[in-house]
Amino acid sequence: MTREGNNYLQTLLPALSLGLLTAAFIIAKTGRDALFFQGSGGLLQLPLVYLNIAAASVPLAVIFVKTMKVWGARPARVGILLLAAAVMAAAAPFLEPGDGKLLLAIFIFIPAIFGLLFASMWLLASDIFENSERSEAARSFSKMGAGTLAGGMVGGLIAKGLAPHLDAKWLIFLGALFTLGVVALVLHIHSRFPTNIVPKNADERAKKARFLAPLSNSYSLTLLIISMTGALAGLFIDFQFYAAAAGANMGSKGNASFFANFYILLNFSSLLLQLFATPKIQDKVGLRGGLMVLPFALIGGATFVTAAATALSRSVLRVTEGGLRSSVHRSIWEQAFIPVDPTDRSSVKIAVDSIAARTAEAIGALGILVWLRQAAPDGALPMPLNTTWMAWVTLATVTAWLLITQKMTVQVRKERGETRATKELEIACERFPDQCPCTTELGKGVA
């Protein structure tokens, strides 16, 4: 095959895999949400669910990283995909609406495992583009982001079409079948594109033996703090949205149709942003500027909710957060991990996106749990809920998120050889001019 054809597949195959995985997630999540949110009962359990998701995510992440170190990243990726599909397929026929322990376990399992699946798939994309020009990688990651959103929209359409005819539990089973399709695609990618990550020697492995050792790097720590503030803001936005949905009392099939419509709208708006806005945003403002788009938009949305805490304002804030996070923010965020040393990237990625984010969500969930115990001491939750305080906390958190991102220094990873390092610096200065030494020094003289 020609080089052009190979480069085309280099982008197309990961985009298809991410799209199919997102479709699996949206279909399974629609079924999960429809079963769980029957009146206010599910909402009362939601803070405990967030805590349990965090509790499940941390050991899963540690086990996954350890597995990657023993088996290698590629076999571990296939293994975790098979695990996700097997658990969902085995549990789906026995799920019932309400407060059952099995449904609660699946409600926790799906976001916990899919968080690792998405992290692993984006790590595969980083591996494939390890030796590519950064401008080429940026274009390809944008296309992969579009593929992800297209898959989410297709998943929402499938869930909406099947919701009137199937019990919600079979949507979870269908999500498992889609995940098996991802396994087939991933195996094909592994066979076609050899890994570009060179293992460390024994001395280097000894220095990096500790799981969180790579986070001693200031750049990685900044990514971790951004992830935590973003996750905390997302938690409060998510809870307010679910509170509005639970107060509607739509029933199982009504819930399935509602969540399917929401995910269709969310992914369609995200896809439009990804296709027409993301490339232009990154070309003009670079990595750091692109990462500031989401928190800047949420400041406006959170301010709107503090002024008018209605179901509509909460839904608009959730669509804004989900749409920008899935489009502009996601593809640029994944590129932020490329400067990290390849042999440390898996540990940093999992620590930042799985452990740190879930820990922040657990802290927020504890606050919501204490508040709910005061709002419903007898177990009867008044509807609609007054969540004004959450809007103010969200506004403060998003402001901190924006300030941290604004102070972020984009790292340029040192490559082997002077020529390669010089080339990388030139590319970085072209894309991130505010980070170049000469530009920074000249800027100091401007009043």
Image (tube, grey):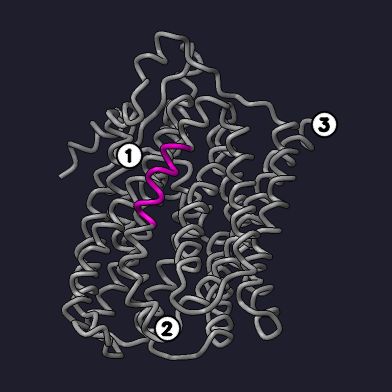
Q: Which mark is residue 179?
A: none
Look at the picture and state if 102 lies above or below 405.
Answer: below
Which percent across, then down, holds residue 415?
A: 46, 18
Q: Nearer the viewer, mark 1 or mark 3?
A: 3
Secondary structure of residue under mark 1? helix
Q: Which residues are magenta?
A: 53-63
**Of helix, strand and loop, which one carries label 2?**
helix
Mark 1 in CB contact with mark 3 (< 8 angstroms): no
Camera-nearest residue between 123 and 205: 205
Quadrant placement of the C terminus: top left
- Residue 80 lies, in percent from the top left, at 58, 43
Q: Magenta span has 397?
A: no
Please report the residue visible at 23 percent of the width from the left and 69 percent of the height from the top. Answer: 369
Q: Label 3 belongs to which residue?
A: 2
Cα–Cα span, label 2 and label 3: 52 Å
Principal secondary structure, stretch drawn in magenta = helix
The label on residue 434 is 1
Q: Three-letter amino acid code at disc 3?
A: Thr
Task: Indicate whether 31 appears above or below 82.
Answer: below
Tell me the number on the disc at residue 245.
Answer: 2
Q: Earlier in the sequence, mark 1 or mark 3?
A: 3
Could you tell whether 305 is left or right of 329 in the image? Answer: left
Q: Secondary structure at mark 3?
A: loop
In three-dimensional space, the C-alpha distance between marks 1 and 2, rounded to whole angstroms, equals 44 Å
Question: Circles 1 and 2: CB distance less than 8 Å?
Answer: no
Q: Position of residue 381 (x, y in %)?
A: 28, 86
**Mark 3 surroundings: few (<14), some (14-19) or many (≥20) residues within 10 A:** few
- State the CA–CA distance, disc 1 to disc 3: 38 Å
